[in-house]
Image: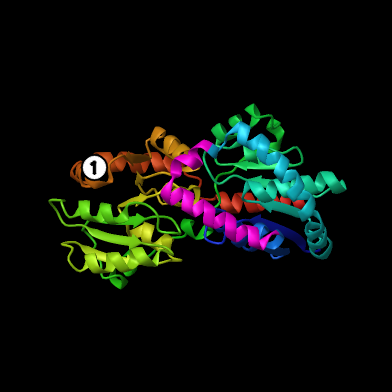
C-alpha cells in the first residue's frame, strides 16, 4: 500500500491552530505508518512579510483595543469587503500553491484555520482541482469566514457547531462532529506523584494552574495578587508562554508570596501540569479548553478575547464546565468558595467529563485517512 501524502495547513507559529495541526500530525503517525505529512504555515509560505505585519497588528489590537476586534470578528459587512481583497490575494497565491501541490502531490489537505481553508478552496475552483479539503474548527462557535463551497468536510467540536454551519449553508453530509484536536498524550495516564515530587509540590494542598495562552496574555499579575488574600495556602503553577516581561515581573513577586509558586515560560508538558492541578485559570482558547475538558479539570475563565474566546466562554459556562471571572482582582473569593464547598468543584469536573472528547485527534486522523484512501 502506497503512503498517503497529507498536507496540514495552519497560520501563526504560537497559536492554537498550530497546536491543532501538530496534534493531528501526531495522531496520524500513531494510527498509520503509511503517511507522508507536510505541516505548513500557509501564511508564511505564501506571504511571509504580510504574516509578520498581520500578526503584529492582531496582537496589538487584542492587547490594547479588543473592542475593535469585537467589531470585526464575524461581521458580515466586513466579511464582504474582505472577500474582494481576498480574491485578489488568492490569485497572487495561486502560483505558489500550484508549485506546492505539484511537488508534494497531496492526497488530502487539512486546514486548522479559516484563511488557508479559503485559499485552498479558491485554488480548487480556479484550477478545477479534485483534492479533498477538510476544515477543522478549533473553537466552539463557527464564524462566517469558515464557509466555502469547495470544502469537502468540516470537522466540528460538537453538534451545536454543526447546526450553526448548516444554518450558514453547509450541507449536513459535509459535517462531522469529532471534537477539537489536542495532543493524544492527554489520554495517557500520568504518574502524578512523580510529577509533584519533581516540581516540589505537596500532594494534599490545592494546586491552581494559571495560563495566559502561548503569549502569556491576561491579568495574571492581578490574579496572583488576589490569591494573596486567600485564607488558606495554595500552590500556584504559572505558565507565562513567550511573555518574557511577565515572567521577569512574576519572578520578583513570587519571592514575596505566601504561597508556593512554580513559574514556567513556554512549556511542552501541559498534560502533566493539568494532571496535578485541581483548577485551571485560563483564557478560553479552543485547544486549551479541550485539553482541560479531557483532563476533567474545572476552569476559571479570565478576560476572554471578544469573538472566538467570548463565544467559547458562553459555551463552556452554559455547559457548567467553567466559571467566568468578571473581576480578576476578586478571583480569590471564587477560589475560596470552590475549595470550601468541594461539591461545586466536583460538579464542574462532572460537566467537563460529560462534554469532553479526549480521543478527538485520533478520531480525526482516522477520518482523514478514510477520506484520503
Label the magenta part by its dominant secondary structure.
helix
Q: Residue at x 42, y 49 (%)?
A: 64
Q: Residue at x 81, y 47 (%)?
A: 124
Q: Is residue 263 above or below residue 212?
A: below
Image coordinates for residue 137, horizontal then vertical, percent: 59, 44
Q: Residue at x 47, y 57 (%)?
A: 186
Q: Which residue is mark 1?
A: 334
Q: How many marks?
A: 1
Looking at the image, residue 248 sits to the left or right of residue 271; the answer is left
View extreme (left): residue: 231
Is residue 49 a member of the stretch shown in magenta? yes
Q: Nearer the viewer, residue 175 or 147?
A: 147
Looking at the image, residue 208 sits to the left or right of residue 159; the answer is left
Q: Residues within 10 Å of mark 1 (few under 14, many from 20)?
A: some
**How did the renderer colour the structure?**
rainbow
Looking at the image, residue 254 sits to the left or right of residue 140; the answer is left
Q: Is residue 280 above or below residue 310?
A: below
View extreme (right): residue: 128
Image coordinates for residue 138, horizontal then vertical, percent: 55, 46
Q: Nearer the viewer, residue 244 or 373?
A: 244
Q: Which residues are magenta?
A: 47-71
Which element type, helix, strand or loop, lies under badge 1?
helix
Q: Quadrant of residue 65?
A: top left
Image coordinates for residue 94, horizontal then vertical, percent: 80, 54
Residue 20: in sight, yes or no?
no
Image quarter where the N terminus lies is: bottom right
Residue 361: in sight, yes or no?
yes
Looking at the image, residue 254 sits to the left or right of residue 41; the answer is left
Q: Residue at x 55, y 44 (%)?
A: 179
Image coordinates for residue 233, horizontal then vertical, percent: 16, 57
Is residue 258 a member of the stretch shown in magenta? no
Amino acid at each position: 500500500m502506497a503512503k498517503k501524502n497529507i498536507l496540514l495547513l495552519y497560520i501563526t507559529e504560537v497559536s492554537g491552530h498550530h497546536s491543532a495541526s501538530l496534534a493531528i500530525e501526531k495522531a496520524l503517525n500513531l494510527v498509520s505508518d503509511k503517511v507522508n505529512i507536510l505541516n505548513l504555515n500557509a501564511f508564511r509560505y505564501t506571504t511571509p512579510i504580510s504574516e509578520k505585519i498581520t500578526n503584529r497588528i492582531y496582537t496589538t489590537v487584542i492587547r490594547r483595543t479588543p473592542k475593535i476586534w469585537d467589531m470585526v470578528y464575524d461581521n458580515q459587512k466586513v466579511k464582504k469587503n474582505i472577500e474582494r481583497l481576498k480574491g485578489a490575494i488568492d490569485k497572487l497565491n495561486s502560483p505558489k500553491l500550484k508549485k506546492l501541490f505539484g511537488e508534494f502531490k497531496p492526497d488530502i489537505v487539512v486546514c486548522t484555520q479559516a484563511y488557508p481553508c479559503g485559499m485552498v478552496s479558491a485554488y480548487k475552483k480556479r484550477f478545477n482541482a479534485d483534492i479533498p479539503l477538510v476544515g477543522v474548527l478549533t473553537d466552539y462557535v463557527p464564524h462566517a469566514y469558515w464557509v466555502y463551497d469547495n470544502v469537502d468536510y468540516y470537522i466540528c467540536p460538537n453538534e451545536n457547531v454543526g447546526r450553526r454551519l448548516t444554518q450558514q449553508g453547509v450541507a449536513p453530509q459535509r459535517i462531522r462532529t469529532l471534537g477539537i484536536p489536542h495532543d493524544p498524550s492527554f489520554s495517557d495516564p500520568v504518574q502524578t506523584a512523580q510529577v509533584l515530587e519533581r516540581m516540589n509540590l505537596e500532594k494534599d494542598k490545592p494546586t491552581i494552574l494559571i495560563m495566559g495562552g502561548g503569549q502569556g496574555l491576561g491579568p495574571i499579575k492581578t490574579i496572583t495578587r488576589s490569591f494573596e488574600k486567600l485564607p488558606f495556602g495554595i500552590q500556584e503553577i504559572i505558565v507565562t508562554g513567550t511573555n518574557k516581561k511577565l515572567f521577569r515581573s512574576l519572578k520578583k513577586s513570587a519571592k514575596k508570596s505566601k504561597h508556593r509558586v512554580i513559574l514556567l515560560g513556554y512549556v511542552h508538558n501541559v498534560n502533566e501540569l493539568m494532571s496535578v492541578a485541581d483548577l485551571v485559570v485560563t483564557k478560553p482558547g479552543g485547544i486549551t479548553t479541550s485539553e482541560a475538558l479531557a483532563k476533567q479539570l474545572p476552569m476559571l475563565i479570565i478576560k476572554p478575547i471578544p469573538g472566538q474566546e467570548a463565544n467559547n466562554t458562553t459555551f463552556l459556562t452554559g455547559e457548567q464546565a467553567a466559571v467566568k471571572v468578571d473581576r480578576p482582582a476578586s478571583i480569590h473569593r471564587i477560589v475560596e468558595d470552590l475549595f470550601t464547598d468541594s461539591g461545586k468543584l466536583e460538579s464542574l469536573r462532572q460537566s467537563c467529563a460529560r462534554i469532553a472528547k479526549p480521543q478527538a485527534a485520533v478520531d480525526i486522523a482516522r477520518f482523514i485517512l478514510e477520506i484520503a484512501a
